[in-house]
Image (cartoon, rainbow, N blue to C red):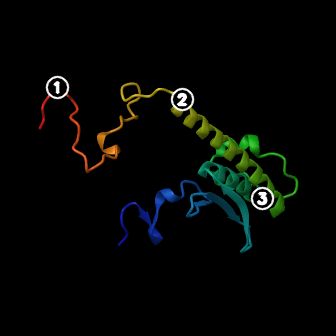
Amino acid sequence: MEMEGQVGGGKRKNERPYKGIRMRKWGKWVAEIREPNKRSRIWLGSYSTPVAAARAYDIAVYYLRGPSARLNFPELLAGDGGGLSDLSAASIRKKAIEVGSRVDATQSSIAAEDDDRRENAPATAQTQPGILKACWFEEKPDLNKKPEPEDPDVDYW
């Protein structure tokens, strides 16, 4: 009996958000594609983001199968799809890695800018609802000491 949210083999659906990619155990996303009428695969690279791996796959599948290929991002192919006269596995791999690397660099720089913006902005629970205040349990109290009262004017003990 298959559990809800799982696909055959016990894999979760969200492990492969795009066609032609998979995630390594250590978190990198990789792309590869099978050559038509062969058992061999074309390695398309290892990337930090699933979007970059999916874009590399899209380039390769477009060159191997033509305009009727099922793409992850059909709207984005127009800018990356031109310019290959040699359709060998090596040239397809080179073009796919070029596009995937460019997307990976862009995605990584966007993530870094977001991190910098979050670090430099004074965020409070009132200004940004997604940010929570530090809680008392995040502190590491000395359990051998008697706790100090929060309000010194009130006698708790």
Q: Residue at x 77, y 50 (%)?
A: 98
Mark with earlier residue (3, 1) = 3
- How packed mark 3 is, by other alpha carbons closer than 10 Å (few <14, some 14-19, many 20 or more), is many
Q: Is residue 103 above or below residue 26?
A: above
Q: Residues at badges 1 and 2 in contact (C-beta under 8 Å)?
A: no
Q: Is residue 68 visible in this depiction of the protein?
A: no
Q: Which mark is nearer the camera, 3 or 2?
A: 2
- Bin the neighbour count of mark 2 within 10 Å (Cα to Cα): few under 14, some 14-19, many 20 and up: few
Mark-to-mark CA distance, 3 and 2: 40 Å
Q: Nearer the viewer, residue 148 or 17?
A: 148
Side (left or right) of 46 relative to 116: right
> Residue extending furthest right?
85
Identify the amino acid type marked 3: Arg
The residue at the point 75 percent across, 40 percent down is: 79
The answer to whether residue 23 is above or below residue 98 is below
Please identify, in this view, whether the residue under mark 3 or under mark 1 is nearer the observer. Answer: 1
In the image, what residue type sits under mark 2?
A: Asn
Q: Residue at x 67, y 40 (%)?
A: 106
Residue 35 position in % (x across, y down): 74, 67
Drawn side of residue 157 relative to residue 47, left or right:
left
What residue is pinned by disc 2?
Answer: 120
**Residue 70 in the image, given as x and y percentages of width and height:** 64, 54
Tell me the SS state at disc 2: helix
Dot 1 corresponds to which residue?
Answer: 153
Please determine whether, in this image, residue 8 is positioned above or below residue 102: below
Of the image marks 1 and 2, the number of the one nearer the N terminus: 2
Residue identified by numbered label 3 = 93
Q: Residue 14 has which mark?
A: none
Q: Earlier in the sequence, mark 3 or mark 2?
A: 3
